[in-house]
Image (cartoon, helix red, strand yellow):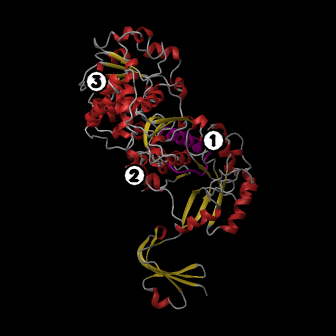
Amino acid sequence: MVTGDFEKELISLRKNRGLRCTDLLSFEDLEKKEVEFIFELAKKTEGFLKGKMKKVSLLKGKTILNFFMESSTRTRTSFELAGKNLGADTINISSSDSALQKGETLLDTAITLDQLQADIIVMRSGFSGAANFLSKNVKASVINAGDGWNEHPTQALLDLYTMKKFVSSNLKGKKLVVVGDVLHSRVFGSLVRAAKMFEMKVIVSAPLTLIRPFMDQWNVVYVSNIEDALKDADIVYALRLQTERAANAYVPSLREYSKTYIVNAKRMALANKNAVVMHPGPVIRELDVHTNILETDVSLIPEQVFSGYCVRFVLLWLLGEKRKVKKVEERQIKV
Amino acid sequence: MDKILIINGRVIDPVNKINKDLDVLIENGKIKKIGKNLLKTDGGHAQIIDAKKKIVSPGFVDVHVHLREPGREDKETIHTASRAAAKGGITSVVGMPNTTPVADNQTVIEYVLSKAKKESLINIFVCGTITKGQKGEELAEIWEMKKTGAVALSDDGSDIQNLDVYRKAMQYAKTYEMPIISHTEDENLFHGGQIHEGKISSKLGLQGIPACAEDAATARLITLVEDVDLPFHFSHVSTKGSVDLIRMARKKKLKITADCTPHHFSLTDESVKVFDTAAKVNPPLRSEDHRQALLQGLL
């Protein structure tokens, strides 16, 4: 297939549909039918992104800035690749090589990036609410690629996509067991909203020191013992213990944590027969998930990465034209 | 003779139990008469102020303000703070000592008071810190600060965590009849929190400040006040637990007083949604059950 044909196929599948939101800051910015729509297009991109010639001109002439104030492998690379595949110019900025290092405020950085006529800014920050703040101050569409402990909406999109592809196209009533550092996890923040949208049953299991308060607002059930939690699980979602956020101080030792909460083959035997293991990455082997699971087809972790590539490709395309319609409150005072 | 007549206003004076539409006559800076229709009888040669649809009341006293001078003049100065206060009907304020440098010695107290004399429109009183450098370790020169004009002591913003130091500070302050104002908080439980620990903090992924960070500190300070027996003030109380503990302590006739800010009894952590930093204060805006308890505590 020639790429020109793929472009036409994708456009005809889209049928002039779009997203209501101009930015993706929280998973709640999307409606269920919009999520399904993204997945419909993402499915179409799979063959193309695995093909020989991965280039279209759907976003030709557009500028995408990947503004990452925290480290990233999967998220940044997939956004950058997807942007390039779409024909956009992509630039990476990190906090260490930006003027933030010299004492510039995030507001002034935002004004600067906006003047460079960026169409999309993909932002990751250690501070909850940072993407929200940026979006209010730039005409560009802002995609939250993770803010502090808050949300990481494209991760939830790729997780749902992976579950629908490998577990069941109908996720209603499926039992999702989340194990590990729920407290510090922005992945959890978006995943729990996504699970609510698709009416999944969510169980969390970790020491109480790593659990957020008021989990009942998302109908999440807490089960302290991982063996009890895993019973009848359809999806086991392990989260990394975020030692960079001092999460190791919430457990006596990594040794005890791994003994009590690692997802391994013995424990997976308690789950449903076809249960799968997912993890947002990076995985810390023998602490979050045991190698005896990682290196089997029970693990969907590599598939999650490819899903992320497809889903982000679609999302960039859908948000690529939003700059001209996005409304931003005028900041400048007329003198 | 200097005569001012305020007419048509709603006079509210809780101490004298007045809440009526009345006129107020002021002569040479003193209230001479409060009554109905004073315009006819006392209007001659007076400056007339029409207070229609306005409240006329004694000047308010704010026992907890931050003048920010010296050191953080970018935020506030004695000049701006005194004008803001006057605009809001506040005629006396007590400035907190967490300036740069901190008001832990007579020189800083002297500086603030002399600047206030020159630039303020209202009465400015100042607090000295309880400990040197507001570090919670060694006592500041409390006697000398009192002699210079400090009216109370506080390590506002970072209260003393070591109870042995706090107890000695209470004993020393009592010796010189200096009341202590406490910003009541356990630093370890506070632990870098951003907003009230609850439904909203969980939803926004912000590190929470649990109510027990204030409750625990209130409880242990009350036991020290009971032991030392001195006038002690809990400032900007924000939790239901503190209200309950303070109520119990007052029943025991301990010399404990407390205040609550208008924002803590009118707003909740719902105001933080979504990431509105204007609603980020310390102590944090709490949830509705705490707000209700604060209102009950005031009434």
Residue under label 2, please give it: A327
- Give, as a three-letter code, the residue at label 3: Lys
Report, in whole angstroms, how far the alpha carbon at label 2 lies from the one at label 1: 49 Å
Q: Nearer the viewer, mark 3 or mark 1?
A: 3
Q: Do the CB atoms of the residues marked 3 and 2 lie less than 8 Å apart?
A: no
Asked if residue B209 shows in the view, the reply is: no
- Relative height, residue B253 to residue B119 (above, below): above
Boundaries of the magenta span: B208-237
Q: Residues within 10 Å of mark 2 (few under 14, many from 20)?
A: some
Q: Check disc 3 and report the residue beneath it.
A: A164
State the residue position of label 1: B160
Indicate the position of residue B162 as horizontal and vertical percent values. 64, 37
The percent position of residue B18, horizontal first and vertical second, equals 44, 72
Q: Is residue A193 above or below residue A167?
A: below
Q: Secondary structure at mark 1?
A: loop
- Seen from the viewer's position, the closer of residues A215 and B262 is A215
**From the viewer's perspective, is residue A236 above or below residue B80?**
above
Q: At which x and y percent is residue A31?
A: 29, 38
Around disc 3, counting alpha carbons within 10 Å, would you say few (fewer than 14), some (14 to 19), or many (20 or more)? Answer: some
Identity, as a three-letter code, of the amino acid under mark 2: Lys
